[in-house]
Image (tube, grey):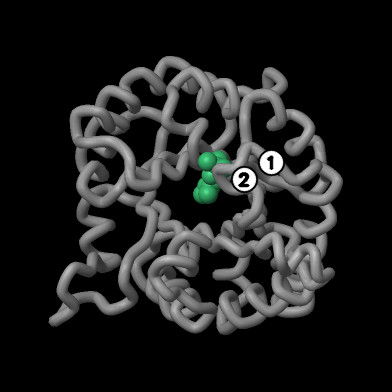
Amino acid sequence: MRRPIIAGNWKMHNTTGEARELVELLKPLVGATDVEVVVCPPFTAIAAAANAAAGSNIAVGAQDFFWEDQGAYTGEVSGPMLRDLGCRYVIIGHSERRQYFAETDATVNKKLMAAYRHELIPIVCVGETLGQREAGETLAVIGHQVWEGLKGLAPDQARELVVAYEPVWAIGTGKTATAADAQEVIAFIRETLGSMYGAAAEAVRIQYGGSVKPENITELMAQPDIDGALVGGASLDAVSFAAIVNYGDH
Ligand code: 13P
């Protein structure tokens, strides 16, 4: 059985005070769930969120990091630095990183290896653009991202992996993939992981992301291969995010 995991990607939102307040509001609202709950603040608010979350069932992750441990890499943040702040998760290869900051499957793979080196659980994002979907290239694009971005793990490492399928056209647009469309691609991701890692693929948790809301989470979670969600906008509001975490009185 795969334990559901619902993560909030705050993107470039929330100061330290706002982060603390959001976590404090969230704690009592998600305290009873058996879903794994993660919040991913911007770097500057990670410590504040982690301090506020201490002793609760809310874990903290980062939205990105660099693969080297230290050195002359102005502006970058490393795995040991994230561990030092109390991070247990790190998002890798979000489509906004790919689109605005030139991340590729090759950099995703380097970050993936670094995450395992530092015992950070990676949440690796894949997803097609609208143009690619309309051209019928979705599965080819996703297959390539999975093979190239996620290669080189031992099967035991692969079991720990979290993958987020986030169709780029569904992010921040209010357009959610239908639960059936999301299931189709996510089943394909699991099948691809099966070709790479054998039975370990059955343990990999695969999230859907892109305009997840309290209104659509239940149907998404009812799909056999969808194990959670990566939530953007709706994770900035404690009540909305808690309603997503507590989907269908899970
Ligand atoms: P929205 O939920 O705002 O569409 O963002 C999805 C996302 O990119 C999460 O990483």
Res 162 seen here: yes
Nearest to viewer (mark 2 / mark 1): 1
Mark 2 CB near ligand 1 (8 Å cut) = yes
Q: Nearer the viewer, residue 211 or 196?
A: 211
Asked if residue 131 is positioned above or below residue 239 in the image, the reply reads below
The residue where tag 2 is placed is: 210
Query: Pointer 2 and pointer 1: residues touching (CB < 8 Å)?
Result: yes
Q: Amino acid at mark 2?
A: Gly
Q: Nearer the viewer, residue 175 or 50?
A: 175
Q: Position of residue 131 (x, y in %)?
A: 71, 66
SS of the residue under disc 2: loop
- Mark on residue 175? 1
Neighbour class for label 2 at 10 Å: few (<14), some, many (≥20)? Answer: many
- Quadrant where ligand 1 appears: top right
- Quarter of the image with the C terminus in it: top right
Q: Amino acid at mark 1?
A: Lys
Residue at the (33%, 25%) spot, across then down: 22
- Relative to residue 29, is residue 66 drawn left or right? left
Residue at the (28%, 36%) spot, across then down: 14
